[in-house]
Amino acid sequence: MAAPNIETIVSLAKRRGFVFPSSEIYGGLGSAWDYGPLGVELSNNVKQQWWRWMVHERDDMEGIDSSIILNRLVWKYSGHEETFSDPLVDCRDCNSRLRADKLTVKSGAPMNPQRINYEEALQQKLLACPNCGSTNLTEPRPFNLMFRTTLGAAAEEDDPFALAYLRPETAQGIFINFLNIQTTLRRKIPFGIAQIGKSFRNEVTPGNFIFRTREFEQMEMEYFVKPGEDERVHQEWIDLCFDWYKSLGLAADNLRLYEQPKEELAHYAKRTVDIHYRFFPERAEDERQWDELMGVANRTDFDLRAHSKKPEDAEGKRFNPDSTEDLSYFDEATKERYYPYVIEPAAGVNRSVLAFLMDAYTERTTDKNETRVVLKLHPALAPIKAAVLPLAKNKPEIVGMAKAIKRSLQPTLRAVYDDTGGIGKLYARQDEIGTPCCVTVDHQSLEDEAVTVRDRDTWEQERIKVADLREHLQRRLNEK
Ligand code: ATP
């Protein structure tokens, strides 16, 4: 079945309590979304899977949870104050404020939409406002994406001493703790530091549901290697990350690797390969059906040098008068001192949730010719693992037994009890939210201490002894 478009997911997400528009009773807030009871479980599962894979299952990884608001100097020396901006243009006809690199290419314009020099293209009037189609646009100007705030009770709005930013990436919190972690955990290069947390960007054009918001969550890891090893390790991480998404159910057809051309690279990057997902299947045959799910960058030694107190190069180009530490590394074995290179896989939690929802979405026709939505989420990601359903809700013994089974399962897996409809309706509801197993308690169960377990993907039913139920469910949940 063809992948659904984002609108189908928005409506499912709202209808079934995955994601709600934020502040809706006050008219909403453009780009903000709240995760409901099922959404929070799904996004927690995504983060948990990533953390387990990235940190727990490796020998060369540590975790961290750094502050969202850091000393402003971090953003000065990381280069964000100066360069973390998007090119902004205004449409003179409809007054829309737009990102120059996200304008519509005029039909028939002779260029690849992913490789546009937008300054030239704007001058030649090859780009148009996506809202009204006008080519009457202003010159691009940089717009810094960092959210500003002020610290302390006495701070005036424009007080430069109180100015602070909400972090636009979690990575800097890792770099400034590199030495703390390396020394206290006695780590030798190569090793990595992983972090999951909120980031904030004052996006010019947020949109497409949870794809681009101003407040979002990232899962980032900085892997420190010896210079010279960086290219090989970078490629390894690209492959590992691509496989991680596939291992959790994303179809290979809906994923691709995208090599960023030189002119797109961030100021710190030597090479960046993005993992793209087909977020916009309705734009078939068009490059823009793809967009970024995750970026895997070779950040070189840019950040550790930039935050180091000592100049390393002859001209002292990166001399940092404010830092109190040198973040270079001394290799005891070779007696060499160097600034490690950094490989960074950076993924969005929200975009991952969206991709997993889109990829899992299927429709199936019943014998009665009704269309059912079946969300075939990987069991590890499914918000609810098992729903326990009584066949007759008016029979206290059946209800009691179903509730007791639910309670016996809940210490090991996320289980729910539901008796708010007929069994067909209850199955349909669980299919739509991706619950891998339904457990039905019927009259027979009272006698034979067995229940019916129904599989979400095959709709097949099996009779299982209550004593074996937990093990049976665990087996199903551990399957691919
Ligand atoms: P884009 O080109 O889409 O703006 P980016 O290249 O600036 O993204 P990175 O800085 O590489 O993004 O951030 C790493 C990941 O964080 C992205 O791959 C994406 O999944 C996520 N991300 C970045 N910005 C946003 C946002 N505004 N909303 C949701 N997720 C985001």
Image (cartoon, rainbow, N blue to C red):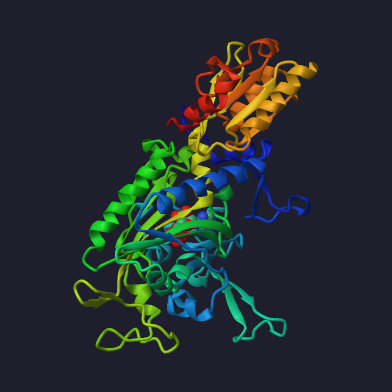
**Residue at the spot 58% in from the left edge and 36% down from the top edge:** 413
Q: Residue furthest front?
A: 467
Horizontal placement of 241 versus 207: left or right? Answer: left
Q: Is residue 345 above or below residue 187?
A: above
- The answer to whether residue 140 of the structure is visible from this angle is no
Q: In this picture, is 299 found above or below 387? A: below
Q: Nearer the viewer, residue 372 or 309?
A: 309
Query: Number of labelled discs?
Result: 0
Residue visible at 58% across and 30% down?
435
Looking at the image, residue 142 lies above or below residue 374: below
Q: Is residue 149 left or right of residue 120?
A: right
- Rendered residue at 51%/30% (across/down): 474
Quarter of the view holding residue 311: bottom left
Left or right relative to 327: residue 362: right
Picture coordinates of residue 112 (x, y %)?
A: 34, 52
Q: Quadrant of the C terminus?
A: top left
Q: Nearer the viewer, residue 233 or 280?
A: 233
Q: In this orientation, which residue lies closer to the viewer: 92 or 234?
A: 234
Which residue lies most toward the left here? 334
**Residue at x 48%, y 36% (from the top left corner):** 359
| Residue 424: % across, % down | 66, 17
Residue 58: where, in percent of width, then height? 36, 52
Q: Position of residue 270 (x, y in %)?
A: 29, 66
Residue 213 visible somewhere in the drawing = yes
Left or right of 86 on screen, residue 116: left
